[in-house]
Amino acid sequence: MKKIHFITLLVFGLLAGTKSFAQLSIDKGTKFINLGIGVGGYASAGGIAFGGSADFGVAPNFTVGGQVAYRSFNFGYSGYNDKINYLYFAVRGSYHFNELLSLSTDKADLYAGLGLGYESVSYSNSIYSGTSFGSGIFVPVHLGGRYFFSEKVGGFAELGTGIAPLLLGITFKL
């Protein structure tokens, strides 16, 4: 948990410490594509999650989009080659704080939001196959930041309640 707090402070410190004369504009028609890995896990969730999301500007400072992710891991707890698979889908909306916080850079984007998702969880081993448990609908929340290294490509970090507590990856502005 200390690592997550440190990484969060580091990301927001880097974003707040940049200097420029313009803000990153989030307007109708703005598009972001994120590809990343999930770090950490909830309860017994092991392995690394892989996922992507897309955000589309629908109004000043507001985006809507979707997210999909997958995580799978093996564990030999019972000696039967146990495996758990998570498949995650969500629609989401985000508010972008750049204007509200008067960020003085066109390279940073701070945002938060919530969504509506479905997570399919299946368990199998050498005796049972495809047993589903823990699947269902949920309301994920997220808090994130992007930093653009060029006009179209950057990195992102996102804390949330989806497939992993921390997503890190690359972001593209289209």
Image (cartoon, grey):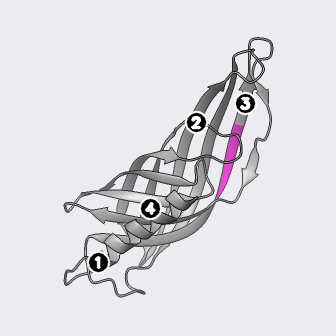
For marks 3 and 1, give the one nearer the viewer.
1
**Disc 1 packing (10 Å; few <14; some 14–19; many ≥20):** few
Q: In this picture, which residue range is highlighted in magenta?
A: 116-120
Indicate the position of residue 154 as horizontal and vertical percent values: 28, 57
Disc 4 to disc 1, C-alpha distance: 15 Å
Q: Which dot, 4 or 2, sits closer to the camera? A: 4
Q: CA distance from mark 3 to mark 1?
A: 44 Å
- In the structure shown, which secondary structural element does the residue marked by tag 2 occupy? strand
Q: Do the numbered discs 3 and 4 sit on residues whose CB atoms are within 8 Å?
A: no
- Label 4 sits on a secondary structure element that is helix
Q: Amino acid at mark 4?
A: Ile
Quick check: 72 above or below 114? above
Which residue in the protein does label 4 denote? 7
The tag on residue 71 is 2
Q: Is residue 26 visible?
A: no
Identify the mark at residue 17; answer none if there is no mark.
1
| Mark 1 residue type | Gly
Dot 2: within a 10 Å radius of its alpha carbon, few (fewer than 14), some, or many (20 or more) residues?
Answer: many
Q: Is residue 107 visible?
A: yes
- How far apart are the two marked residues, 3 and 4, measured between alpha carbons? 31 Å
Left-right relation of 49 to 129: left
Mark sitting earlier along the chain (4/1):
4
Query: Which residue occupies 42% across, 46% down?
Result: 36
Q: Residue at x 54, y 61 (%)?
A: 2
The one of 63 and 153 positioned closer to us in this rendering: 153
For the residues labelled 2 and 1, the Cα–Cα distance comes to 34 Å
The mark closer to the camera, 2 or 1, is: 1
| The C terminus: image quadrant | bottom left
Label ID, residue 122: 3
Q: Amino acid at mark 3?
A: Ser
* Label 4: how many Cα within 10 Å (few below 14, some 14–19, many 20+): few
Type of amino acid at the residue the image marks with label 2:
Arg
